[in-house]
Image (cartoon, coloured by chain):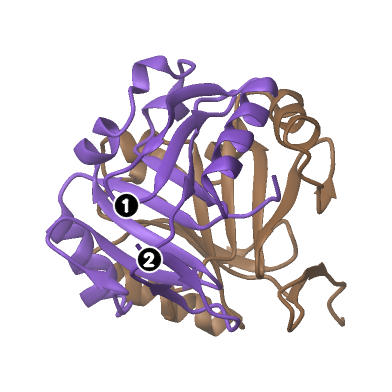
Chain colours: A brown, B purple
Amino acid sequence: MQPHLSLVTLGVRDLPTARRFYVEGLGWEPFLDLDEIVFIQIGHGLLFGLFPATGLDADVDPALAPSGPASAAPFALAHNVDSEAEVDAAVARAAAAGATVLKRPQHADFGGYHAYVADPDGFRWEIAHNPGFAVDPDGTVRLVTPEP
Amino acid sequence: MQPHLSLVTLGVRDLPTARRFYVEGLGWEPFLDLDEIVFIQIGHGLLFGLFPATGLDADVDPALAPSGPASAAPFALAHNVDSEAEVDAAVARAAAAGATVLKRPQHADFGGYHAYVADPDGFRWEIAHNPGFAVDPDGTVRLVTPEP
């Protein structure tokens, strides 16, 4: 499990307000700009997501996480790996290291395969195989349609 | 103000516990491993910091931030820029876009110049000029001693 961050997602109270701040206010150009989520490329192979906090919370059961301020924090970090087997292995490794599994590895709405774990403080990590998330050698992220 | 993330810092309850999870448990090699902070390189030009939540909170006045779960979230994102003037300009731009200034631009303990702002949800961004934080063309972060 190499240290690698693919996505930082903030769970916001109101997406239009957050969008107005980052996109119109700061002038950050969206990578993907939908009614339900906004992505901005924020680094080499790295996306920044704005997503309603209610949706972020619905993706896991925060009650499973260790209690404390981090568990209630409406944000998630994501670590992408190259295959479903690597998701399983990373989750097993994290659990062996003391992580709490918030969502067991499973097929995801976005077309990939993912799980959520919480670190000892309750910070949420999504571990995902997302065949639609491609990174060019120069770091540009592309959404691709996986081969059937 | 280009969309760019330099640092993700988690404010943890107990640094040895967090270190044990990420460094020993997951096997993530530290970039800097000190009693008061642990940094791990987590992407191209991107560091992941583990820092006691009390220290993270002491760096700003969270009471200034918009109320809500994000304000209480023990974590911060950092956006590095190339000069002190760019810190001032980025803070002014963010404030004009509706950010709350949590710490006005000022010289920092780490030898640079920084400020904190909160986005509309209260998520904390540090905006910093850190002459000691260098990124090689291949994305490797190096700590350098700035010229006097």
Looking at the picture, how far across and down is residue A110, in whole percent?
74, 59
Tell me the amino acid under the disc marked 1. Gly
Tell me the amino acid under the disc marked 2. Pro
> In which quadrant of the rendered image does the C terminus of chain B lie?
bottom left
Q: Is residue A122 visible?
A: no
Looking at the picture, how far across and down is residue A51, in whole percent?
66, 39
Q: Give whichever of discs 2 and 1 has the lower sequence position.
A: 1
Q: Secondary structure at mark 2?
A: loop
Q: Secondary structure at mark 1?
A: loop
The residue beneath circle 2 is B146
Task: In the rendered structure, find residue A61 and report the number of the disc placed on it.
Answer: none
Q: Is residue A73 above or below residue A113?
A: above
The residue beneath circle 1 is B111
Circle 1 packing at 10 Å, graded few (<14), some (14-19), many (20+), is: few
Q: Is residue A143 above or below residue A86?
A: above
Q: Are marks 2 and 1 in contact (CB under 8 Å)?
A: yes
Q: Label 1 marks which chain's residue?
A: B
Residue at 31%, 79% in the rendered image: B29
Residue at 50%, 30% in the rendered image: B117
